Image: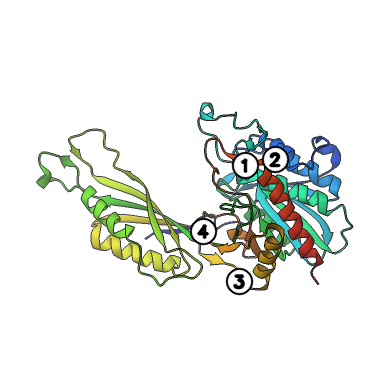
Amino acid sequence: MPFVLAGQDFAISTVTEKWLKPSMTIPLSADVWDPVALTSALIRCPSITPQDAGALDVVAAALIPLGFEVHDLTFEGGGGPRTRNLFAKRGEGAPHFCFAGHTDVVPAGAEDAWRHPPFAGVSDGTYLWGRGAVDMKGAIGAYLCALGTFLKNPFTRGTLSLMITGDEEGTGVNGTPKILEWLKGRGESIDLCLVGEPTSCTHIGDTLKIGRRGSLNGILVVHGMQGHVAFPQKADNPLPRLVETLFHLGAGPTEAPSTLFEPTRLEITSIDVGNPTVNLIPAKATARFNIRFSDAQTPDSLGAWLKETCQLHAGSHELTLCLSGVAESLTPGPLTDFLQDTVESSTGLRPCLSTKGATSDARFIRHIASVIELGLQNHTMHQVDEHVPLQDLHDLTALYGAILTQYFSRS
C-alpha cells in the first residue's frame, strides 16, 4: 500500500534573497495605520496563490519605517511553484515573538457573482469586501497597525518578527517550511508564534486554536471487468463493491473520545468511473476521500484500518494514501492561561481552546515554537462576497496590541 508524506522534502533547493530598503517599497498613504486602509491595500493586490502581485511590498512598506530589517525570500524547487515570501525582524534575543500569516488567496471564482469586484477592496461603511478580507489579509493589516501603535513606545527587550508566505493556500512546499529552514540556518529561535488565521466564531477573540486535527487524503481504485449491462454475469461491476466499502469507511474507526479533538471523520470528495455511455459496465471505479483525525489516531493506525476495511469489502483494489499532517496540539498551561487572561481583559470574553477547523501553516511552525492561532471571524472565508466588518478589524487590532503589550511586560 503506497504511503506518501506530502511535502516531506523541505530542504532548501534554491533561494533568492534580497534585503528590502525604503526606496525599494511602494509608498503608502498617511492613513497607513488604519487597519481598514491597509487591508484594502492588500486586497487590491490579486495575489492568487502562488502569485504575489505586490502584496508583500505593501507589508514591507509598513514594516521598514518601524525599524524592521526585511528579507524578501523567493524559494523554488521541491516540486512546488516558485514562491515569494517575507521575513522581517526587529530586536535581538529572548523573548522572540513572531507573527505568521499568508498573503496568497484562493481564486475568486465567478467574478460577476460578487457584489463588489473581488480585488477592489471596497468599503461600504460597514464592511470591507474582497478576496482575502477574512483569510487572511485582514489579520495582517490589523497586526501591522497594532505594531505601529506598540512601537510608539521604546522597544528594548526581546525580538519582534513576522513570517509571511505567499504559498499557504497552495502546495506550501516553497512557503513556510522553507522559511523555517532558512531561519534554522541563521540560528534563529522563536518562543511564541501567533498565526493570524480566522479562528473567531461569533466575537473577535472568542476562540484560540491550539492545535489541528490530522489530515489524510486517500484514493481508492476498485477493479472489475468491463461488459455489457444486459449481460452482467459476463462482467464484474466494481461500483457495488466501491459503494459498500465507502459505506463502511464512512462509519469511521473505533476510537476512545479525545478531550481536545472532535472524533475522526472521513468525507468522500469524488467518485468517478469515466463511463462515456449508459450500457457499459465499467472496468474500474475510483473514489477520493479525506480523513480529519483526532489524537486518538496515528497515520499507521488509520492506514491499518483502511487496509483491513478495503480487503474485507473492495475485492481487487489499489489504495494510495497521502498524509498532510498529524493531529497535534499545544498542551494547556501557563502560556494558554496568559493568552486567555489577556484576551479576556481586552474583550470581556474568555476564549475557548479549540482544535477545530482546517490545517494551516501552524502545523510546520509547531515543531520549532509554541504556536497559537487567533484572527477574524471565519464566516465568509473562501466564499463569493468574502467580507469583514470594519469594527472587527479595529477590534482585532486592539486585541493584537494588548497581546504584544502584555507579552513583553511579563517578567
Residue type at mark 4 is: Lys
Question: SS for tag 2?
Answer: helix
- Please tell me how crowded label 4 is: few (under 14), some (14-19), or many (20+) other residues with Cα within 10 Å: some
Along the line of sight, which residue is nearer the eye, 273 or 343? 343
Amino acid on which disc 1 is placed: Val
Q: Residue at x 61, y 44 (%)?
A: 134
**Where on the picture, by quarter, is residue 107?**
top right
Up the image or down, 159 lies above or below 123; here it is below
Whether residue 261 is visible: yes
Quarter holding the C terminus is bottom right
Q: Earlier in the sequence, mark 4 or mark 3?
A: 3
Secondary structure under the numbered disc 4 in the rendered image? loop
Q: Position of residue 191 (x, y in %)?
A: 72, 66
- Which three-letter amino acid code belongs to the residue tagged 2? Thr
Residue 22 at x, y = what percent? Answer: 85, 41
Tag of residue 388: 1
Query: Which one is earlier in the sequence, the residue at label 2 or at label 4?
Result: 2
Residue located 50% across and 61% down the image:
213
User: Tag 2: Cα neighbours inside 10 Å, few (<14), some, or many (≥20)?
Assistant: many
Left or right, 40 with reference to 238 = right
| Other-residue count near label 1 (Cα within 10 Å), few / some / many at <14 / 14–19 / ≥20 | many
**Label 3 – label 1 distance at C-alpha:** 30 Å
* Disc on res. 358: none
- Report if the CB atoms under discs 2 and 1 are less than 8 Å apart: yes
Where is residue 335? Give x, y as percent: 68, 69
To which residue does mark 4 refer? 356
Q: Which residue is mark 3?
A: 332
> Which is more toward the observer, 204 or 183?
204
Mark 1–mark 4 CB contact (< 8 Å): no
Residue 39 image label: 2
Q: Amino acid at mark 3?
A: Pro
